[in-house]
Structures are given as structure tokens and as C-alpha cells.
Amino acid sequence: MSKTSKNNNIKWRKVANDVFLTPLPVVLKAIEMSNITPDMTVLDPCKGTGNFYNNLPPCKKDWAEITEGKDFFDFKERVNLIIGNPPFSIWNKWLEHTISITDKFCYIMGQQNLTDRRLHFLHANGWGLTKMYLLQVDFWFGRTYICLFEKGKESIIGVADKPIVCDICNTKCERGRKGNSVNECSKNK
Ligand SMILES: C[S@@+](CC[C@H](N)C(=O)[O-])C[C@H]1O[C@@H](n2cnc3c(N)ncnc32)[C@H](O)[C@@H]1O
């Protein structure tokens, strides 16, 4: 493995952390996708150094940031939009709190964080993914999306309701694993 790919691989990082500052082009694209108007109340839930908060167009804005003593989970007022790049280690809890205080949010989500379970959870609660933009940030791990979710809107993404298993034995056999071919049932060798 090359030095570069080692550095980009979360498993190789010496200290687990989820403080990633968002590059300005990503921030500006997320803001553009969110259609912010001056009458809107907008929350940056994890301000960091302020990359989102400081670049918001005129609106009624507020912020939270744990390292400055303002915990997002203590923020209970309703807002029109939540926009930012949340800490990836607590996505489920973060999404649950998000949907309890807004009807619209725009988050930066790693490919590995936009899971079927999370989409099922949001769809089941009446949320739709209404805009999505695929990013390539050279120095971030994997691919990343900007995702806009809105309550009560139709989702542009469908999600399979269960995994597709081997169509020969109709179970989760070892097909495609442990050296078995992806094209044959592991039980019928
Ligand atoms: C991925 S960084 C994003 C920083 C900044 N918003 C940006 O995009 O450049 C995540 C941020 O979430 C903050 N954070 C973690 N837990 C938090 C919480 N419970 N409430 C508020 N902020 C939190 C971290 O301190 C960190 O600044």
C-alpha cells in the first residue's frame, strides 16, 4: 500500500477523529443546493472553524460547536434548515436529533455513511432525499456526497428492502466469499 493511500485510510490513522474541515467549494455547493432565503432560520450544528456559518448568505443564523461549549444535542429550537458536515462517529444519533428540530437539512455524507438503514429510517419518517451531488475531495477517504433531505418530499433514491442473496440456495451462503466464485453457489460445488 502506498503512503498516500495509507494516509487516506481511516484504519491507518493514529488517532480516531472526526474533525474534518470542509473545503470552501464544497461549502458553497451545499449552500447553493439549499436555496437559503433571508427569512429562513439556519443552523450550522457543528461549526468547527466556521466554514459553513461564515459563508451563509443573509438569513437568521445560529450555530453549535461542542469544543466551544455549545452541544448540538442541547439545541431544541426549530429551524428551517440545518446545514453542515457532522461528526461521522455519531451519525444515527445526529440524524435523530436533526429530524426532531427541522424539516430540511443538507449534510456532507461519506459514501460509507449513506447506508440503506439510514435511508430506510429517513424514508420511514417521511423524509425524501431531494438533491444529491457527488464530490471527489482528493484528500478525504473515499467518495463523498452532498445530500439535501426534505420532510414530506418524494425521494430521488430508492432503497432495496432486503439484501439480495444467492439465487441458487436462497440463503446467505459463502458465494463470493472465502475464495468462492461470485458466479456459483458455494453449497453446490
Ligand atoms: C467534520 S467536522 C466539521 C467542522 C466544520 N463544520 C467544517 O465543515 O469545516 C465536525 C465538527 O463537529 C463538532 N462536534 C462534534 N460533536 C458535536 C456536538 N455534539 N455538538 C456540536 N458540535 C460537535 C466537532 O468538534 C467538529 O468541529
Image: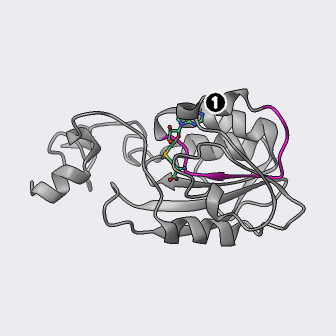
**Nearer to me, 187 or 133:** 133
Residue at x 17%, y 39% (from the top left corner): 178
How busy is the neighbourhood of tag 1: few (under 14 within 10 Å), some, or many (20 plus)? Answer: some
Looking at the picture, tell me which residue is in the foreground, 126 or 164.
Answer: 126
Instruction: State yes or no: residue 82 in magenta.
Output: yes
Instruction: Name the image quarter holding residue 63.
Output: top right
Q: Position of residue 157 (x, y in %)?
A: 64, 61
Residue at 57% over, 33% down? 68
Q: Whole-percent x and y of residue 41?
A: 83, 53
Q: Residue furthest right?
A: 39
Which residue occupies the foreground of this view, 158 or 96?
96
Image quadrant occupied by the N terminus? bottom left
Using the image, determine if residue 137 lies above or below residue 78. below
Label 1 near ligand 1 (CB < 8 Å): yes
**Protein image colouring:** one colour
Is 139 positioned to the left or the right of 28 in the image?
Answer: left
- The residue depicted at 85 percent of the width and 41 percent of the height is 78
x%, y% of residue 179? 14, 44
> Magenta stretch containing residue 122, yes or no?
no
Q: Which secondary structure dominates the residues rendered in magenta? A: loop
Vertical placement of 33 versus 155: above or below?
below
- Region in magenta: 76-87
Quarter residue 5 falls in: bottom left
Give me the residue at 55% from left, 37% from top. Answer: 91
Looking at numbered disc 1 in the image, what kind of residue is underneath it? Asp
Residue 171 percent location from the top left of the image:
40, 36
168 relative to 47 in the view: left or right: left
Number of on-image labels: 1
**173 or 57: nearer the eye?**
57
**Residue at which label 1 appears:** 71
Image quarter where the C terminus lies is top left
